[in-house]
Amino acid sequence: MESTSTSTATISGAPISGPQPRLAWLGTLGGVVLGGVLLFAVWAKALDPSAFADQIRLEGLDVLLSAQAVALLALALEAGLGVALLLGVRRLWVLIPAALLVAFFLFLTGRTWWMTAHGLRSEAESCGCFGNLVQRTPAEAFWQDLLLLVPALLLAFVGRGGRGDLPMRFPTLRTAAALAVAVGAAVFAWKAPELPLDNLATRLKPGVTVAGLCTGGGDEPVCLDRVAPDLKTGSHFVVLADLADPALEGAVGALNDFSNSGGAVTVLSASPAEAQQAFFWRFGPAFPIVETPEALLRPLYRRLPRSFRVEDGRVTETYPGLPPLPNAS
Amino acid sequence: MTHRRIVSGLFLAVLLATVATVANAATPAAATAQPAPAVDNVLNGFKRTGDYLLLVNGKPVPAAEIYRNDRLPAYLILSQAFPNVVLLLPGTMTVETVPAAKLVRAKDGTVGVAADADTKPQGKFKLEGDKVVFAAEGRTGSLGSNPPLLGARKSPDLKNHSPEYITTAKGYAPKPGIIAALKQERKPVRVKVFFGSWCPHCKEHLPFLMRVEDELRGSGSTIQFEYYGLPKGFSNEPEAKKYNVDGVPLAIVFVNGKEAGRIRGDAPWNAPEAALSGILSGKAAATR
């Protein structure tokens, strides 16, 4: 027994009637899921485009254009495809680039997994395709991408057919919406670093514990409470900083005054030991500077310096720039 | 006869006590402690450190004592290569000297400068690569990073390399009951400790275990301690690979030549005698 449903759809403002393929709903569902995943990934990366650019540099994808430009273009493409799929556009001009994008993501995550498994890359260097917002090991990144993206992509091909699904058709409104979101995503990513979204864009936000800020997976993650054990108890101001940053150099006096008046200040920096030593002799900090793995530090900020307050191991406040020290004004 | 002996003994004791009293009265300085000189209220609390090595004419001077004050911050250098104590002040990058006689040693092992000491400016120090180069009283010296302690070592090697281990070990009080039990241990136990002299966690925790070793020394306990220094980035170091060392400090406990457990992580290292006792009694799970 064959059941054929007849429906009326509005595409490009013109009603198109015709028999819908039997499993069209499955294809639409696949497209919606794939579009949703792509849009979530865009959101996560657009909040901190410089971290995404770092990832592009790491993967060697900044050959023709700068990493920042590649990041903006990639976000625009991903956003456009995501919206088109979400709106039910399952033409080949959407599905083929989406398939290529999925294949590319899987290639990247698979290659990273292989490289880390063979000791060619540090596990913590790789964040996967969700930027810094989501913490995943390389193996998790590969398998999650595979399981989230591939079934949805395959389903999106199911149930295509009928006049409305002919190749190379551009439904005006939905295409325009996809283009608008693509441009919007690029503009948002471009301006995002200036927006007060640090708590949203990074893993460092009020309420998290220093024991919960970790990098690396498996049984032995490297967590902030291990790198800076003093933060587990008492009240501290913590500054995430680049030791070559003139802003930090200029603040040493105020930080020293605060430290010498009984306050606790700790600077976390990914600068190597040699740079820390040079900073110590040149500027004479009276507060500890703790060498922190880049992979642990990078997901905690969008721009340096960034600061936070810790009370008994729990983050209570975050600040863009240097902390508001009581006696520093 | 016995009575005469007792009287003679008493007479001798009284005579000795009288002589001692007279001698003490004649040399009061020897009998009573000199009042400690007043210490400068800024230049005090310097702690011995093994972070740096003094070089004079490019040659290391391992006998030099180097002290650090984190609060100022500042360094004091005591060495026969310099007639007086050298004071290095990061931040202003200045060098000063303090008369050697004006150095005050506190009971807790820290040093300071006497309040009435005059410091003499000696100019500025320079940073050349990873070295701090300074000139004082016509002689040139430099502070360079102390190379890491590598390979199989014993406790005194660690204390010589990183004198701060001594202070931390002295300040640690292991639980007496557990130490008493460990002293009774008669099985052949070997504790192989992997560490990095460059590692801050080792600096914090390793002295606790060294104190435990000090407590057990000479007690007849069969627990033997050996230390193995690893370089930074030790994942390919053969000994680290052989024992699957993925972080330091790490102590592997062998009983009768077989691994019985590992001491790793903050909590066990905060009381290593308890962790060791737990492994030996089979109460602590052998973690790998």
Image (cartoon, coloured by chain):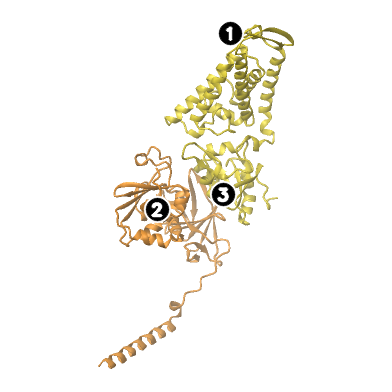
Chain colours: A yellow, B orange
Q: Is residue B234 left or right of residue A232?
A: left
**Residue furthest front as drawn:** A1
**Location of residue B14 by image quarter:** bottom left
Please determine if labels 3 and 1 lie on a single subunit. Answer: yes
Nearest to the observer: residue A82 or residue A197? A82
Disc 2 and disc 3: Cα gap in Å?
28 Å
Mark 3–mark 1 CB contact (< 8 Å) = no
Numbered tag placed on residue B278 in the rendering: 2
Q: Residues within 10 Å of mark 1 (few under 14, many from 20)?
A: few
Residue to which mark 1 is pinned? A1
**Of marks 2 and 1, the one in the foreground:** 1
Nearest to the observer: residue B209 or residue B283? B283
Secondary structure under tag 1 reads loop
Q: Chain of mark 2?
A: B
Quadrant location, the N terminus of chain B: bottom left
Q: Is residue B8 left or right of residue A180?
A: left
Q: Residue A147 appears at what percent x and percent y? A: 53, 24
Q: Residue B171 appears at what percent x and percent y? A: 46, 60
Residue to which mark 3 is pinned? A231
Nearest to the observer: residue A247 or residue B207? B207
Q: Amino acid at mark 3?
A: Leu
Q: Is residue B33 left or right of residue A22?
A: left
Q: Residues within 10 Å of mark 3 (few under 14, many from 20)?
A: many
Q: Residues within 10 Å of mark 2 (few under 14, many from 20)?
A: some
Q: Residue at x 51, y 61 (%)?
A: B98
Q: Residue B128 appears at what percent x and percent y? A: 49, 44
Q: Amino acid at mark 2?
A: Gly
Q: Residue at x 50, y 26 (%)?
A: A143
